[in-house]
Amino acid sequence: MKSYKIIIISILILMIAIFVIRFCISPQNGKKLTYDKPTHIVSVEDTRLFYNCMNENDKALYEIFLDLVNNKDTADYTSTVYMKTETFQELSFDHIWNVYYGMVFDHPEFFFLLTGGESRIEGYNSEIKDTTVLTFYLTEAPEGENQDIETFEKAADDFLLDIDLSAEKAEIELQIHDKLLEEITYDYELFESNYQDYYDLGATAYGALVSHKAICSGYASAFQYLLQRAGIPCAYVTGTAYYPEENNNRPDGTKDSNHAWNLVKLDDAYYEVDTTWDDFEMEDTDIDESFVNEMYEDTDAMYNVTHTFYNLTTREIEYYRQQENTTFYIEGYEPYNPSGDCHHYRGLNEELEDDPISIYLNNLLPEALGKAG
């Protein structure tokens, strides 16, 4: 009988100890999640395509990170994820960070999480029997961050003032595409820095909408955010885009580079769009000025050139072939077509072994078939 009481007391002490440990390491004002038995803790708009393509466990983890960002100005806001140790060992921290960046790249308005050169989120783990406890929090925001966010949102609001948001989704997308090309200039200085300043605002939607100057990631993020604001699902795609040298007619000499563009969902159909390469500019080239002027007067061909990479299927953008409708026939000059054969390949495999986040995110997204299903 005495030994039985000792066992009961020991069990009670163990239960109290576990409770105390869990209480001490659990957030006082954040959220808790059991990864293996996911429950949804926040609402996520259906315009966020990475989220929509995740499994239920990862969706719940994504929501934890989203909640952290939404409470970034709350002091000591810390969230905890409980995960079977076996599950944690199978997934590793790499997968957890992949989900985190899925949340970040689903929200271009969180541009501030991609600047400064260091991750704003930190986490650590501890063990309780067969459970791994993951604790996450955001580091303190740098001075001026909230002002930058306010400036960015104001710029997005101003941009959308000229967009007829009551129109059909396809028409809204076209309006946003065309206005974006009018307002943004490609930031060659940032590009030529060999991305040493990648975390510059010019690589984000902020650079595109506030400074009106950006590299491809800024174009793609801005297009994504504006479509999302208009209720159109859109994702950020990364990979490689290039013209085979023998088919390179681009005045900027673009040959081969890491690149970013978009996947857009209209009703049940998916399309790929590259606003950066649609932003065709001839002003800074050595091509004869009178020829350039006459090119701009051919409004039909110029329209086609600036919509070369607009709403294509994945197959079409992977193996784009020069089209007759982008050829300029100007008296006294040889026919000229700036849209040569080219390729856009999503980063999907181990060739990107130094960029596992891109592999994970690109593989989440469906192929663009240009039709329902």
Image: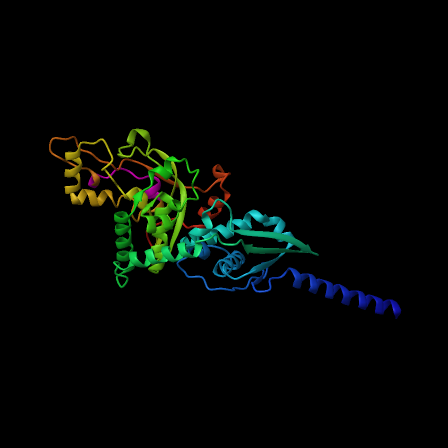
Residue 371: x %, y % from top left: 33, 53
Would you say 294 lies left or right of 284 here? left
Q: Does the magenta stretch include residue 76?
A: no
Quick one: which residue is furthest to the left in this view? Answer: 331
Q: In which quarter of the image is the N terminus?
A: bottom right
Does 320 appear in magenta?
yes
Q: Is residue 311 left or right of residue 110?
A: left
**Quarter of the rendering containing residue 155:** bottom left
Colour scheme of the picture: rainbow
Q: In this view, does 325 lie above or below 32?
A: above
Q: Is residue 373 visible?
A: no
- Give left or right: position of 328 versus 15: left
At which x and y percent is residue 339?
A: 26, 37
Q: Which residue is drawn at 46% across and 56% down?
A: 51
Quarter that holds the C terminus: bottom left
Residue farthest toward the right in the current orientation of the protein = 2
Q: Residue at x 59, y 58 (%)?
A: 81
In this rendered view, identify the residue nearer to me: 91 or 199: 199
Q: Which residue is drawn at 63% across and 53% down?
A: 125
Percent across and percent down for residue 284 are 25, 35
Residue 227 versus residue 144: which sits nearer the camera? 144
Q: Where is residue 62 shown, x and y percent of the image?
A: 50, 57
Q: For residue 159, say whether it is visible.
A: yes
Q: Which residue lies furthest to the top in this view?
A: 246
Task: Between residue 143 and residue 44, name the one nearer to us.
Answer: 143
* Image: 109 above or below 299: below
Q: What stretch is highlighted in magenta?
A: 315-325
| Number of numbered discs on residues | 0
Q: Which of 287 and 140 is in front in this view?
A: 140
The part of the image, by quadrant, that contains residue 6 is bottom right
